[in-house]
Image (cartoon, rainbow, N blue to C red):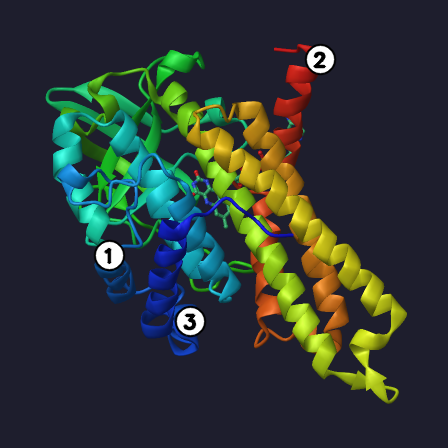
Amino acid sequence: MERDIYDEDHEAFRGVVKEFIKRSATDEHRKRWEADGEIDRATMLAAGEAGIIGLSVPEEFGGAGMLQDYRFRAVVLEETIKAGLGSLAGALGIQDDLAVPYLVHMGTQAQKEKWLPGMATGEILGALAMTEPGAGSDLRGIRTTAKKVDGGYLVNGAKTFISSGKTADIVVTFVKTGEGDRPDAFSLLILEDGMAGFDHGKTLQKMGFHGWDTAELSFSDVLVPEENLIGGKEGLGFVQLMMNLPLERLSIGVAAAAAGEAAFDWTRDYVLSREAFGERVADFQNTRFKLADMATTVDVMWTYVDRAMELYADQKLTAEEAAKVKFWTTDREAELLDVGVQLHGGYGYITEYPIARAYLDARVHRIYGGTNEIMRDIVSRKIVGKR
Ligand SMILES: Cc1cc2nc3c(=O)[nH]c(=O)nc-3n(C[C@H](O)[C@H](O)[C@H](O)COP(=O)(O)OP(=O)(O)OC[C@H]3O[C@@H](n4cnc5c(N)ncnc54)[C@H](O)[C@@H]3O)c2cc1C
């Protein structure tokens, strides 16, 4: 089904992203990232040079100023995922959807001036650290503390599963600045690479996304200056996280729809060229029916995701709507990739094939950004009026 969410500016930008991929994100690059377990800095700088990172950084801080138009971000996600570059899509997403927004929307003027220009060029990479070994879904159960001392905060604790946690220069870190678990007991602090007592710890070995680092972080008496408190005021952290979660979940929805579409494209191409019993695999009725189901699911996914993008543009994408988009699209993504792998036969299990890599990458879409159970919890509480 034809989509009409993009105009000619977005299509021109799509050309820029495609050109960047042809030049700086080839299969060679991908293999290197996977061997190294991370995207190299040169690639992120090339992304900055091409203008496809830090999209929402305002022009006055050296960015493209695409704050009001999320569709450019969606184009980056679509093109990188459809090119089989899930790890690159993820690394760019962390910067643009999980790190930059906290500064653009909630940072003080000084914080914006200090970090945003570098974030638009790829010289400064960010990450977001909420999850801890003992607290993921239950964010208010975190134990990392930031104790007020002269001139700043003394941070102690540990985080885990932090995407881009090894490569990040700055980490937006969710900490406890107060007692108990009331929303105002939490704050967001920027921890900088190289601060004494801040250790990037172990890089975790994952099922998928092999070219994108996920790390443990630990903090031992890290002295963080007061100026690094996001928004310049204590006790706002929980609300700040809640404000940005719809964007994070929308992006996971876009990524899921793009991976679903890619699964369809890769599978259609494969079954058209593969033969068994003297005919194309595509000619078996089972295959044709599966392709019909896949094509229809992809259409419905995009129709839904495109509508969510429109709502986001109008600042009307609520927490519940974003949660619905996140769990529904990632569940469909999993089904599409599973069918795609099956129709590839044995080759579907071989990671040289993009369908196999995408299948492995996609598994975490139902876990991070809030698990799909937590998404259903958010949606169902609203339905029944449970606080
Ligand atoms: C590759 C990867 C990258 C990640 N990147 C980041 C990152 O950049 N930053 C970051 O902060 N975190 C990140 N995470 C962490 C991720 O967001 C958490 O793993 C996720 O929120 C789940 O938390 P948990 O692992 O503690 O699971 P738990 O909260 O322990 O959940 C375990 C199970 O219980 C279920 N469950 C929990 N509570 C409920 C409930 N109330 N009702 C029903 N079921 C429930 C869950 O759905 C899940 O199935 C990442 C994780 C991975 C694997």
Q: What residue did someone put label 1 on?
A: 48
Give the camera-side residue of 144 and 306: 306
**Mark 2 residue's CB less than 8 Å from ligand 1:** no
- Image spot of residue 140 (x, y percent): 47, 22
Say above or below: 47 vs 146.
below
Say above or below: 319 vs 44.
above
Residue type at the position of mark 1:
Gly
Q: Secondary structure at mark 2?
A: helix
Q: What residue did someone put label 3 on?
A: 30
User: In this image, 44 relative to 79: left or right?
Assistant: left
Residue type at the position of mark 3:
Arg
Residue type at the position of mark 2:
Val
Q: Residues within 10 Å of mark 3 (few under 14, many from 20)?
A: many
Say above or below: 237 vs 57.
above
Q: Earlier in the sequence, mark 3 or mark 2?
A: 3
Q: Earlier in the sequence, mark 1 or mark 3?
A: 3
The residue lying at 58 percent from left, 57 percent from top is 259
Where does the C terminus fall, quadrant-wise?
A: top right
Give the camera-side residue of 243 and 4: 4
**Is residue 212 in view from this perspective?**
no
* Callouts 3 and 2 close, C-beta under 8 Å: no
Q: Quadrant of residue 148?
A: top left
User: In this image, 166 relative to 130: left or right?
Assistant: left
- Image spot of residue 112 (x, y percent): 17, 33
Q: Secondary structure at mark 3?
A: helix
